[in-house]
Image (tube, coloured by chain):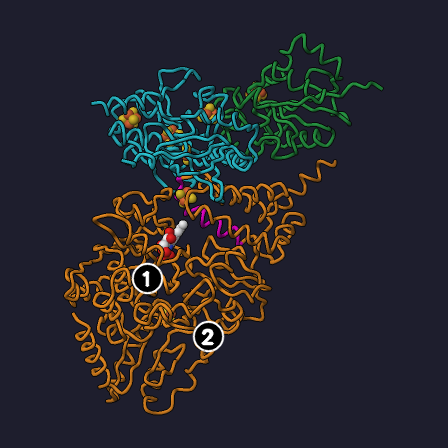
């Protein structure tokens, strides 16, 4: 068995920007690959979230029943859960619909603004929750990395520290909206 | 007006009253009036006249045991009739000079025996719209004594000696406050009476203002003399139109008798009072907000210091006291500080008026010596919990007070004991709760009150009470978690310690005290999704449970 | 004669022996000595309202916390400005502010120039535990030059004070109570139709993205509230 830590990254209601920024670590990713195996991620081809993940990085807010299921599963199978980016931490952009509710948004997107076959989708698309919430409203989160997105440097410093057990001062690295 | 003239008036009234063989006092205050006391009085007057007996029919303020209303007290025998209907008028008039009407007589002896009436000494005995009635019961004697025989310092000293503490909630020593204002330098000083009484369910101050308005005016005039003020304000909430009308009449009558105005009682003392109406916001009872409101600004509290005693109305030294505090002044001046000091418990002297409500037989106004045990109030004066239910807790201190559990009924009622038990004296609300009350829901109710009454100026109270309410609602509807409870407790701590005024500082009390004594109920709601009292619907619980079940899937 | 010594107070702040003039606030003395106390409602040049409660400090011998922006110094006072207890309260207060309205920093005009945002960072806030309230709030863009976005307002009332106390126009005021409080222009009329003189002072003193200048794009919106003390000095000099 490999002694490397198992790393997973997941994507809920977010723009994928956090994942992009993660990939922006560029050559430092190779360094990271020495320390971890990426066992699940939008960038690798695994269908199911594996067991016994050591570190899970989650992008995006919880906006649908699907997201809720996913985040509970991720939590149940991961040792350390990191909320990555403002969407996961505050709701951020996806939560901007909260004051007006999901119906108004659906109407706007699929009905009022649609030119062909205006209709609210009821299959395939998961049901939206009434309010978009940060992931810690559903499960316990161990580390919060704010930023929209957190910079590649932030990722690098934070992950290195978390893997090696060095002290980590997140507010010194990043903030909401950074 | 001189002492002699005052005595002359008293004599005249007594003489006039002695022309009657009987005095029939009918309570015309809110609770009794709403149950037909008006018609009853008309019937009594009519029948008395027809009977040819010499009867004085008098309308009075609240007599106390409102739940037994309408009440009628017949003097000189001091017979009390309860639940009197218009149709009983004939029997009452017929009984004068004969045996009392047995079936109307109520057994309220125990109810009254444990009470000591200082503030309410005139309740049920005088017509609040007649200054002469007040004078006939030693009214304004204290003012004249103070003006003619005592120095302002002497008055302050007497109040200090009495050990009187403010009845508006804080319990600040009244003599100390008067001394501060007296010593404060300023050409102009003000005396203000706080009649805002915003606690839901409380009506002690209303009752005094409506039932015995001159007592408040006399107390304020004595205070003005003691601190060197010549102008006073009574701040009454606009929801108390009767109190405003009675006070207006009383002020006019007092002026006509030379008891207010310039050169009062042939001395150099000038003093007059204006009434100011409050818009009925709870926070306007807070002293700095109240003063802002009198000045015509938005009623929001200000950081203290400076205290009003140093810089109050328009920046001038201002004495602000509660209605009941002022109502205690005349008796203290009349009977001496020692007399008052000898009543009550070690650090809480005198008596306190409470509005007793909730799950209790005799609801209404009571006045008890401080130090009285809670069980004496509940079991003896209140007549116990009706309907075979069990006493669960007593809530004192208004919306920001706390709940005291049934097993602490041997607690003596005093500022310090209530504080130590996690509640407060407050202005005198006392709500009795039995086993049909859910304590989490009770806490939520009071937090909701504080949330809607918050003025919104400071963050911890404005947003903190709203968050506390959200968290409590979660617990009540079955979606609450242990994390929510933990956050709620932490929030209580921040709101209590960082809010600007008393409203925010005390808003967590209902939560903290129920958590202290009834934590189990919180845990039942959270862990077992069950409301032990069966009050909360727990409507959100099934959803929460399914969601949790899905994780395991 | 010997009046002077009474006008100088010595006190201790965070272990440092300091002297101050009588009547100075704890905050003024701390700032003169480069001791940082977080503030949001305070603004040099405006009256103090003691409303945000972030500047609360501990005084030795008293359990009561005092707002440094209004509490004046006294002889022998021992002040602590950054205890664990204070830090916890400050974080909670900031959390309350973030949860109260809709702060979406990433798309906010003030991103990177916001006092609330940087204070959250300074106080080590990485997430908000309080449930977000998500209120539905208006944005008034009727003014030709400025916009008020109530989603970002923290009700510090700096705008109210600067407009009343400095500009003398008294356009801003607070309406409603408790959690429903809102700043309004005139008697709740559109800002564009109000008696505003368009001086822009309120926009400059607003600590957040609630008031902003329409001519700026995106989050390129730094504010310059430093004009106030100078303005006051100039006025006094006249
Ligand atoms: C939120 C709040 C509401 C208050 N409401 C009242 C009130 O309705 N009546 C009152 O007499 N005092 C009220 N007080 C207390 C007053 O601020 C003040 O302490 C009191 O009027 C002083 O009078 P006392 O010394 O005679 O008690 C209130 C205080 C707070 C913080
Ligand atoms: S935090 Fe920003 S970058 Fe990350 S997913 Fe959300 S919107 Fe995209
Ligand atoms: S504690 Fe509440 S009522 Fe008092 S000033 Fe603050 S917001 Fe207003
Ligand atoms: S006002 Fe400040 S804290 Fe609020 S969203 Fe804008 S930048 Fe963020
Ligand atoms: S811009 Fe208008 S509202 Fe703002 S301070 Fe100036 S006058 Fe007042
Ligand atoms: S608009 Fe700006 S300055 Fe005015 S109260 Fe809101 S946050 Fe403060
Ligand atoms: S109203 Fe009549 S006894 Fe109280
Ligand atoms: S800065 Fe002192 S309370 Fe806001």
Percent from the top left, x then y, of residue B193?
30, 56
Q: Measuring 46% from the left and 46% from the top, which residue is drawn there?
A: B505
- Boundaries of the magenta span: B442-457
Is B445 a magenta residue?
yes
Percent from the top left, x then y, of residue B350?
41, 67
Percent from the top left, x then y, of residue C115?
44, 25
Percent from the top left, x then y, of residue B191?
27, 55
Q: Which chain is orange?
A: B
Q: Residues within 10 Å of mark 2 (few under 14, many from 20)?
A: some
Chain C: drawing colour:
cyan
Q: Residues within 10 Å of mark 1 (few under 14, many from 20)?
A: some
Q: Measuring 22% from the left and 57% from the top, which residue is drawn there?
A: B273
Q: In the image, is C23 to the left or to the right of A72?
A: left
Residue B172, can we see it?
A: yes
Q: Which chain is green?
A: A
Q: Nearer the viewer, residue C146 or C199?
A: C199
Ligand 2, seen in the image, is in the quarter at: top right
Quarter assignment of residue B47: bottom left
Q: How far is the residue under mark 2 from the one under mark 1? A: 30 Å
Quarter assignment of residue A77: top right
Q: Residue under circle 1? A: B157
Q: What secondary structure characterizes most of the magenta part?
A: helix
Give me the disc on residue B114: 2
- Which secondary structure lies at badge 2? loop
Which residue sits furthest front?
C1
């Amino acid at each position: 068995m490999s002694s490397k830590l198992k790393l997973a990254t997941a994507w809920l209601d977010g723009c994928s920007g956090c994942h992009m920024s993660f990939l922006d670590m560029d050559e430092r990713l190779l360094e990271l690959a020495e320390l971890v195996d990426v066992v699940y991620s939008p960038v690798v081809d695994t269908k199911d979230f594996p067991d016994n993940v050591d570190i899970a990085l989650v992008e995006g807010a919880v906006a649908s029943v699907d997201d809720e299921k996913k985040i509970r599963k991720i939590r149940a199978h991961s040792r350390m859960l990191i909320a990555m980016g403002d969407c996961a931490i505050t709701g951020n952009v996806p939560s901007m619909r909260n004051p007006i509710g999901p119906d108004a948004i659906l109407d706007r997107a699929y009905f009022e603004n649609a030119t062909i076959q205006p209709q609210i989708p009821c299959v395939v698309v998961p049901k939206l929750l009434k309010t978009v919430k940060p992931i810690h409203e559903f499960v316990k989160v161990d580390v919060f990395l704010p930023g929209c997105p957190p910079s590649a440097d932030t990722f690098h410093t934070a992950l290195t520290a978390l893997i090696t057990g060095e002290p980590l001062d997140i507010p010194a690295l990043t903030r909401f909206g950074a | 007006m001189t002492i002699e003239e005052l005595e002359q008036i008293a004599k005249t009234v007594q003489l006039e009253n002695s022309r009657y063989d009987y005095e029939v006092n009918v309570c015309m205050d809110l609770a009794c009036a709403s149950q037909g006391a008006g018609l009853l009085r008309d019937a009594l007057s009519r029948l008395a006249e027809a009977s040819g007996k010499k009867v004085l029919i008098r309308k009075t303020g609240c007599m106390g045991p409102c739940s037994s209303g309408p009440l009628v007290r017949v003097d000189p025998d001091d017979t009390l009739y309860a639940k009197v209907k218009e149709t009983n008028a004939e029997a009452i008039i017929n009984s004068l000079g004969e045996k009392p009407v047995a079936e109307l007589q109520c057994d309220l002896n125990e109810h009254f025996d444990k009470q000591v009436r200082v503030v309410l000494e005139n309740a049920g005995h005088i017509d609040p719209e007649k200054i002469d009635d007040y004078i006939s019961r030693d009214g304004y004697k204290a003012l004249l004594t103070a003006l003619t025989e005592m120095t302002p310092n002497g008055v302050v000293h007497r109040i200090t000696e009495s050990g009187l503490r403010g009845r508006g909630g804080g319990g600040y020593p009244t003599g100390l406050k008067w001394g501060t204002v007296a010593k404060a330098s300023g050409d102009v000083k003000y005396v203000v009476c706080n009649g805002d009484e915003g606690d839901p369910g409380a009506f002690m101050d209303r009752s005094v203002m409506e039932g015995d308005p001159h007592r408040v005016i006399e107390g304020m005039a004595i205070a003005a003399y003691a601190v060197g003020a010549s102008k006073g304000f009574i701040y009454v909430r606009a929801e108390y139109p009767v109190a405003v009308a009675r006070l207006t009449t009383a002020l006019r009558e007092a002026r006509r008798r030379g008891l207010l105005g310039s050169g009062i009682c042939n001395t150099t003392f000038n003093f007059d009072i204006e009434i100011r109406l409050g818009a009925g916001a709870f926070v306007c009872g807070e002293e700095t907000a109240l003063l802002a409101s009198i000045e015509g600004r938005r009623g929001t509290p200000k950081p203290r210091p400076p205290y009003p005693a140093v810089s109050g109305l328009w920046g001038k030294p201002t004495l602000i006291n509660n209605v009941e505090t002022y109502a205690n002044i005349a008796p203290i001046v009349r009977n001496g500080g020692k007399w008052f000091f000898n009543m009550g418990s070690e650090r809480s002297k005198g008596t306190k008026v409470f509005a007793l409500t909730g799950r209790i037989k005799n609801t209404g106004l009571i006045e008890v010596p401080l130090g009285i045990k809670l069980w004496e109030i509940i079991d003896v004066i209140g007549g116990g919990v009706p309907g075979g239910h069990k006493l669960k807790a007593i809530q004192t201190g208004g919306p920001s007070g706390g709940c005291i559990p049934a097993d602490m009924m041997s607690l003596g009622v005093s500022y310090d004991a209530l504080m130590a038990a996690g509640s407060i004296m407050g202005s005198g609300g006392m709500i009795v709760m039995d086993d049909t009350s859910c304590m989490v829901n009770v806490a939520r109710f009071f937090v909701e009150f504080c949330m809607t009454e918050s003025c919104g100026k400071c963050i911890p109270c404005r947003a903190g009470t709203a968050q506390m309410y959200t968290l409590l609602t979660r617990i009540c509807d079955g979606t609450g978690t242990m994390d929510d409870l933990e956050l709620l407790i932490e929030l209580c701590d921040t709101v209590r310690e960082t809010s600007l005024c008393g409203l925010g500082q005390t808003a967590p009390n209902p939560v903290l005290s129920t958590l202290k004594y009834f934590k189990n109920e919180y845990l039942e709601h959270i862990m077992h999704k069950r409301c032990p009292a069966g009050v909360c619907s727990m409507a959100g619980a099934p959803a929460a449970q399914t969601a949790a079940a899905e994780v395991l899937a | 004669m010997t009046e002077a010594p009474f006008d100088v107070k010595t006190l201790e702040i965070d272990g440092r022996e300091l002297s101050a003039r009588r009547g100075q606030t704890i905050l003024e003395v701390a700032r003169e000595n480069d001791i940082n106390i977080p503030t949001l409602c305070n603004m040099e040049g405006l009256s103090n309202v003691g409303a945000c409660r972030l500047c609360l400090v501990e005084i030795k011998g008293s359990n009561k916390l005092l707002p440094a922006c209004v509490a004046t110094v006294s002889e022998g006072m021992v002040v602590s400005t950054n205890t664990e207890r204070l830090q916890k309260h400050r974080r909670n207060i900031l959390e309350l502010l973030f949860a109260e309205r809709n702060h979406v920093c990433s798309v906010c005009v003030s991103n990177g120039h916001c006092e609330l945002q940087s204070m959250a960072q300074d106080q080590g806030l990485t997430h908000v535990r309080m449930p977000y309230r998500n209120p539905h709030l208006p944005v008034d863009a009727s003014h030709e030059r400025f916009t008020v976005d109530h989603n970002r307002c923290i009700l510090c009332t700096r705008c109210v004070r600067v407009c009343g106390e400095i500009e003398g126009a008294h356009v801003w005021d607070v309406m409603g109570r408790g959690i429903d409080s809102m700043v309004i222009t005139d008697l709740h009329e559109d800002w564009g139709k109000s008696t505003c003189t368009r001086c822009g002072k309120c926009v400059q003193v607003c600590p957040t993205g609630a008031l902003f200048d329409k001519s700026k794009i995106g989050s390129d919106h730094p504010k310059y509230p430093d004009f106030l003390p100078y303005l006051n000095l100039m006025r006094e000099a006249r």
